Amino acid sequence: MKHTLKNVFHSPRFLVGFIIFMAILLTVLIYPYFVHRDPLQGLGKGFLEPGTYVSVYDANNTGTYRVDLPEAAEKRLESTLPAEDRQMMLDFLKAKGVDVSGLDASNDKLEGLLAAWKENYDEADAKKNKYEGFSTQAKRNALRRLDNRISGDNSNVAMSVVRGEGEEATSTAVSDTDYVKVDEVANAITLPLGTDNFGRDTLTELVKATGISLLIGLIAGSIATMLGLLVGLLAGYVGGLLDDVLMFIANIFTVIPGFVLLILIYSALGAESRGITTCAVIIGITSWVWTARSVRSQVISLRNRDHVNLSKLSGHSLFRIVTTDILPYIASYVVMAFILQVSSGILAEAQLSMLGLGPNPNELPTLGLMMNWAKLFGAYTSSNAWWAYFPVILMIALISFSLNLMNTGLDQVFNPTLRD
Amino acid sequence: MKTDEMNPAVVADNRESVSFGTRDKDFSKEPLCLSGRGVTRVFHTGKVTTVAVDHVDFDFHKGELISIVGESGSGKTTLSKMLLGLLEPTEGEIMFQGKPRDISTGAKKREYWKGIQAIFQDPFSSYNVFHKIDSVLLDCINMRGGKNLPKEQKIAMMTEACSFVNLKFAELTNKYPFELSGGQMQRLMIARIFLLKPNILLADEPTSMIDACSRATILDMLLKLRDETGMTVIFITHDIGLAYYISDAVYIMEHGKFVESGKPDKVMLEPEAPYTKRLISDVPKIHEPWDLSTVELLQKA
């Protein structure tokens, strides 16, 4: 036993799978102690990109520090110069006959665009020549305002903060060198994976969903393995009529596509009565067949072995023979089957939820439900919110990858012929 | 342990003690231990029907050493499983100690198995690899009703059984069967029988998987056990030469039927059935060229 365990942990595949799985499991277990947030609580409206969000209101009420960054003006311009203004600059340069082939409205090219602008724009020149598209006074005024902003003349866009109400209101000017410390702002939140369509913190939701999905996989896997083991042992060891009846049932389950059966049961139940446990149980009782078949065939080959005959001759009961002379011999196989069942249970839940047949969406998130929401609210398409679905896909892939890796690792240890 | 098996002196010593004492004894006056009338076993695999054992009759007496000889596939193992009650005969009746055998319930089976025990061919697959040697032997003590004996007495019994087969219990305790050699495992099997003391011992080719040196030791122990306890030994083998040396009665089995039976001297020295002749001619004789005439005869037929 000790020797086997040692061998198992010497298998690199098993070890890699085990480490990945344990990392996921530990994250799921420890995360709630650091972030006390309800995973289903909406923090905002719609998808928010990943990043740190600082309250403007609180930032204005926080003490400021003077920081003079050399490239501050340029960066500010980069982030505030709208696309239509950039387009207008390009149009003007084109109208004036300047070669703009290397330039466009993107941030990368902003430096070149600004240089070309500064070289070619002159207010008096624009007024005199009336370039095509810029002949009206309004257009020329727009060009002048744009030029002012670019040259750093902020007199038109100065900012001030008004505090208090009515007569007591005081106004403070905000300088472009005023900075607040993020830690000192009363309300700031870092969303490493942004928010989903409901404005929920995707990371917190993902961690919770991973936990729930693992639980579903575990329950479904345990039920499937237990059921398969029981049926396989009975059919294989007792044999005769019982074997025929049990295998007949197993054949029926094999002929009916499991997933279709799952969809039918799920839709018949209705979303309200589909709790996490119900889902797991249903997945479990529709996926025992292959375990049962392979356990049965292994038991049949075992039941005529001499050590089983000897055990019978020693007067041991059926229960004792099955538990001490048969089960230990197939234990390694059952563990492997269990790992695969957990993996396929998680995948089955994800598939069903993707079709909108998952557990009740108002209770807890699951990986499948998160994918379903991302699909329903256009994260794949219109919003292009990769953070709402890509981490979920990655998590599902990681879980089943690690479980399958553990399974192949065990297979190599227990089946010496597979060792390379 | 290994040195014992290898030591020619020990082996030679054991050979000398092989008992020939009961060869000429008339066992027909002894009470019947196990007998069968028309015992048949048919296997169905799909549409193919195989008659493994075909209406065999036999009478095994108390204290007798019976050899059932036949080649692979002749139905020896099927017959032995029926005798042990691990398989039900399709037809026919088996009598145990003169009365029809009744093993219809689990309790009756357990009672029957107190009277009949077995040693199997392959010592490597006869043990549950997850159980220690102690538990194998303790099982036997429990089966004989010694469950509540004090621990010291149990250990004394196990030590006695081990020393009967030239093993040291102190060295075996807390070991697993697979840590022993094939010969040691088979000797442990005999120690098991020593503790159980059944009326009938069915030995299904107990020496065929073991090297020639250990074979003599094991046969000697079986015979010694028979002499001490007076049990009936049913010895199943494909080695007619071996059967000749040790048996009180020989049954020759071909295609599920007994083609010849009787005292070994009669069967071996004046064989009637062609199959028996062939089996005898197949025994390698060291000082003569190999007689292949019967094989040629069979091929012509």
Image: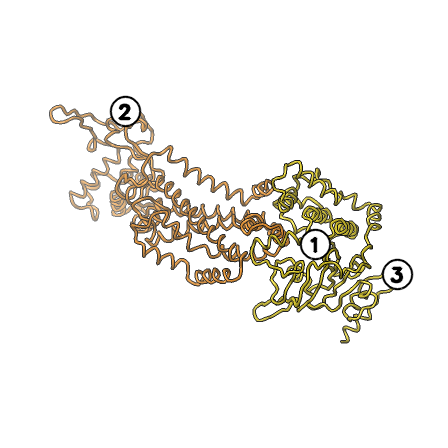
Chain colours: A orange, B yellow
Residue type marked 1:
Leu
Q: Is residue B114 left or right of residue A390?
A: right
Q: Quadrant of residue B206?
A: bottom right
Residue type marked 3:
His
* Mark seen at residue A64: 2
Cβ atoms under marks 1 and 3 closer than 8 Å: no
Label 2 to label 3: alpha-carbon separation: 114 Å
Answer yes or no: are tags 1 and 3 on the same subunit. Answer: yes
| Chain of the residue under the numbered disc 3 shown in the image | B
Q: Quadrant of residue B179?
A: top right
Say which quadrant the N terminus of chain B sits in.
top right
Q: Nearer the viewer, residue A317 or A121?
A: A317
Percent of width and height locating residue B236:
72, 59
Percent of width and height locating residue A413:
58, 47
Local SS, label 2: loop
Percent of width and height locating residue B125:
65, 52
Image position of B269 with respect to B190: above or below: below
| Badge 3 density bin: few <14, some 14–19, many ≥20, Cα 10 Å | few
The residue that appears at 20% across and 28% down in the rendered structure is A161
| Chain of the residue under the numbered disc 2 shown in the image | A
Q: Is residue A322 left or right of residue A198?
A: right
Instruction: Looking at the image, tell me whether mark 1 or mark 3 is earlier in sequence order.
Output: 1
* Mark seen at residue A134: none
Residue type marked 2:
Thr
Between tags 2 and 1, which lies in front? 1
| Chain of the residue under the numbered disc 1 shown in the image | B
Residue wearing tag 1: B201
Q: Nearer the viewer, residue B230 or A28?
A: B230
Between tags 2 and 3, which lies in front? 3
Residue wearing tag 3: B287
Does any portion of residue A330 appear in the rendered image?
A: no
Does any portion of residue A215 appear in the rendered image?
A: yes
